[in-house]
Image (spheres, grey):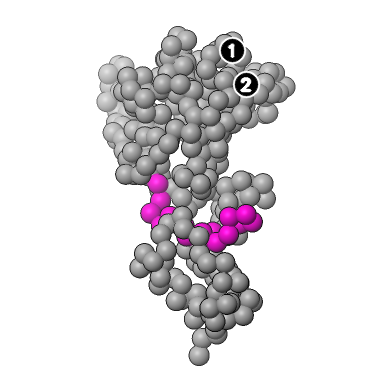
Amino acid sequence: MAPKWRELADKLAEQIKRGDYAPGQQLPQIRELVADGEGSKSTVHAAYKALEAEGLVTSSRGHGTVVRQQVPLRRLGIARYDKAKWRDSDEVAFIADRVASGRSYRRNEQTQTVSLVEAPPSVAAAHGLPEGADVYARARLVKEGDQPTHTLTSYYLPEHVEGTRIVDPAPGPAGRGGGFRVLYDAGYEIDHMKESIFARAATSDEAKLLQLPAGEPVVELHRTTYTASGTVVEFAIGVHAASRFAWEYDFKVPDSTKREKGQQ
C-alpha cells in the first residue's frame, strides 16, 4: 500500500494533468489541505516535494507551490535573428520565440540594469580587450508572466553604444527592434554570430532568481555577434532554465567541397 503522501501526490498530479490546476496557478496552501483532511502537514509537504521532483510544480518562498508550464518555449536558433524581425519590424529575439511558440508576451516582461563594468576574462577575450577594460553590461531578466525564464547579459564597447538606447535602463527592449536595431542605426549592422551552449548545475543565486526547483540544471549560452568586417559588437551570456525551453535549429546543410572547388 502506497504511503499517504504518495497517494496525495498522485491525486494532485492527475488534477494538474487534467487541467484542474492551470499552468501558473498556485496550489492550495499546505494548511488548507490539512484542514480539508488530506493529511498532516508533513504528509502534504512530502506530496508537494514529490510533485516538484517530478517537474509538475515549482516551490519558492513568497510564491508558494505553482503549476509549471508543461510545454516548453521554442527557443529558436537562427530564425530568431532574422533581420526582417528587428530591422524592418519590432520583433526582438525573446518575442520571436514567444510568437513561434504561440504564447503571449508583454514587452515589460524583459527588465534590465545597465552599468559600466570591468570586463571579465571571457568578455575581454571575445572583444579583444585587456582584462579590466571598461565595457557596458546590459543585464536582462526575462519572464513569462510572473515566471522567470532566463537571464541575458550583453557586453558592449563604450564607443559603440554610448548615447544610445542600449545604455537606457528603462524596462523592455531598447526601443523598436531592440539592441540589434540600435547597433544598425549606429552603423554596426550585424552579419553573423557564433553561439555555444552547455548545461551545468545552477548556482544558488540563479536558482533563486529563476525560481528553479531543487536540482534543475541551467543551460548557459555564449553569443558573439559580428559585423561583416569581423568587428565584435556584442558578447552575451545567457542562463536559461533547462526545462522551460526546447532549442530549435533550422539551417541549410553546408557542402564545403563546393566552396573549395569554387576557390580553385
Nearer-the-camera pick, 97 or 112? 112
Q: What's drawn in magenta, residue-wise? A: 58-73
The residue depicted at 41 percent of the width and 32 percent of the height is 93
In which quarter of the view is residue 239 placed?
A: top right
Farthest bottom residue? 1
Q: Is residue 21 left or right of residue 152?
A: left
The residue depicted at 51 percent of the width and 46 percent of the height is 146
Give above or below for 218 relative to 2: above
In the picture, which quadrant includes the C terminus? top left
Amino acid on which disc 2 is placed = Tyr
Per the model, the C-alpha gap separating discs 1 and 2 is 9 Å
Give above or below for 51 relative to 24: below
The residue depicted at 67 percent of the width and 46 percent of the height is 205
x and y percent of residue 10 in the render? 46, 76
In the rendered image, residue 69 lying in the magenta stretch gets the answer yes
Tell me which label, 1 or 2, sits earlier in the chain.
2
Judging by the rendered image, the residue that carries numbered circle 2 is: 136
Give above or below for 209 relative to 24: above
Amino acid on which disc 1 is placed = Glu
Nearer-the-camera pick, 37 or 172? 37
In which quarter of the view is residue 136 placed?
A: top right
Nearer-the-camera pick, 98 or 221? 98
The secondary element bearing badge 2 is classed as strand
Judging by the rendered image, the residue that carries numbered circle 1 is: 162
x and y percent of residue 119 in the render? 67, 24
